[in-house]
Amino acid sequence: MLEWLALPLAVGVAAFLPKGKIKDETIIKQIFENKGVCIKRNDVLQYPNLKSKIQCEGYTTYLFSMPYGLNTEDIEDVLSAIKEALQKEVEIEVDGYLKMEVFHEQLPKKWDYDADLFRPGTWEVPIGKNPKGILYHDFDKYAHFLVGGVPGFGKTVFMKSIFHTLLLNNPADVEFYILDLKGGLEFYKYSSLPQVKAVSCNVYETAEVLGAIVEKMKKMELHFRKNGYTNINDTPIKKRTFVIVDEGAELSPDLKVGEEKKYAQFCQAALSEICRIGRAVGYRCIYGTQYPSSKSVNMSIKMNIVSRISFIAASQVSSRVILDDIGAEDLPSIPGRAIYKVEKCRTVQVPYIDDNMMFKMMEERKDDLIDSRKSRNHSTDNRPTRNRKN
Ligand SMILES: Nc1ncnc2c1ncn2[C@@H]1O[C@H](COP(=O)(O)OP(=O)(O)O)[C@@H](O)[C@H]1O
Ligand SMILES: [Mg+2]
């Protein structure tokens, strides 16, 4: 009788053994097997095969050979199961081999923005922390940015941190047009800064602002043609113009009726134009939206935005609209937790900032913000002389 009891007991104990006792690579291998991540060749199942394991500071890299026929998507499909089983953050890259980085530490649940994050004179902004360090996004490399995710998890805070960084990194050379379509509640308070050229609060004002931007951009294009310039990064022009859209869905013609519909159509066309030709001539678009459907993220806008970030998404479909990848639907419900995608997906915790922190840092740099505009040398940057505010 006792012998009969012994077996179920052993199985029961094994189920309660701490996960740490089983090697991570064993768990990964088991998941590949259980989920059928393999191809069949000559009646033999071939799985990704572990070739090497490298211990790095803060993470372990596993290198697997990949049987022909398996691809990135096959691994992405089981990534959330791997993360859940290991209870660790995991990043993958498939390039002939499968490189899997398993982080030893969990991401912080919150961390505050601070002045050490500035990189003055550059167009680099902090995106977030992962166990390897702080990731930066360079707007001179990747001009436009798509920001998505369900409401309440950090899109506006993230766009404010980008605005704040760009402003204080380049007070003399940056200018902003902000389309704050939630009635101006978030950004209108910054409209008196000399660098902020306009804050529009509804679809009518937005159409006017975007019309003026496209006109300026076309003049810039002409200027580039005359001078034989191809890309602003290779010219002496330092100025960069950022168009921030907080809630792009408000510009979706499908969600509007009557006269507003026509204005929304105009706005979407103008934004597509900015995303299409702005990169070369110094216009950058940061496009935030909570309804990631093909209606709110117009195809031609999306096509021209390579870099993406998604906070928690409502579904795999939503995650795909923003990232062209699944994964954001499985993020934990932590505000500021997001997947940043440039070339590959990386999970990060975005820095937290609020208006008080921003005002305080701006106050400390008041002279830079105001004086640098007055004393700058206009002769080298081809700044157009007309704008909405002067
Ligand atoms: N990076 C962050 N770290 C910690 N908490 C955050 C972060 N971003 C946002 N939050 C919290 O989530 C709330 C909603 O953020 P918000 O940016 O307004 O979301 P969304 O624009 O996506 O609706 C904020 O008021 C803040 O309390
Ligand atoms: Mg918001």
Image (cartoon, rainbow, N blue to C red):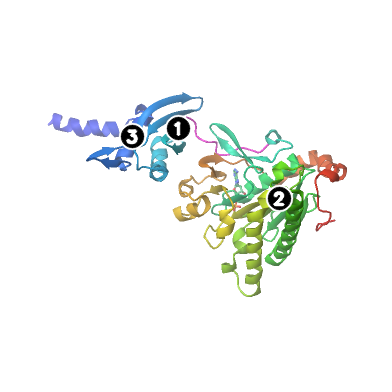
Q: Earlier in the sequence, mark 1 or mark 3?
A: 3
Query: Hey, which quadrant is residue 211 in on the image?
Result: bottom right
| Extreme-bottom residue of the structure | 258
- The reply to whether the residue tagged 3 has its Cβ within 8 angstroms of ligand 1 is no
Q: Answer above or below: position of 130 versus 262.
A: above
Q: Is residue 70 left or right of residue 296?
A: left
| Extreme-right residue of the structure | 375
| Extreme-left residue of the structure | 1
Residue holding disc 1: 102
Which of 77/193 is in front?
Answer: 77
Q: Residue at x 53, y 42 (%)?
A: 343
Locate the C terminus and report the quarter of the image it occupies: bottom right
SS at mark 1?
strand
Residue holding disc 3: 29
Q: Tell me the distance, in whole angstroms, between the alpha carbons under discs 1 and 3.
A: 14 Å
- Which amino acid type is shown beneath numbered disc 3? Lys
**Bounds of the magenta segment:** 99-114
Q: Earlier in the sequence, mark 2 or mark 1?
A: 1
Q: Nearer the viewer, mark 3 or mark 2?
A: 2
Characterize the magenta stretch by its predominant secondary structure: loop
Q: Is residue 81 left or right of residue 374?
A: left
Residue 354 picture location, percent across and down:
68, 45
- The reply to whether the residue tagged 2 has its Cβ within 8 angstroms of ligand 2 is no
Residue 115 picture location, percent across and down:
71, 35
Residue holding disc 2: 281
Q: Is residue 15 left or right of residue 239?
A: left
Q: Residue at x 68, y 57 (%)?
A: 180
Q: Residues within 10 Å of mark 1 (few under 14, many from 20)?
A: many
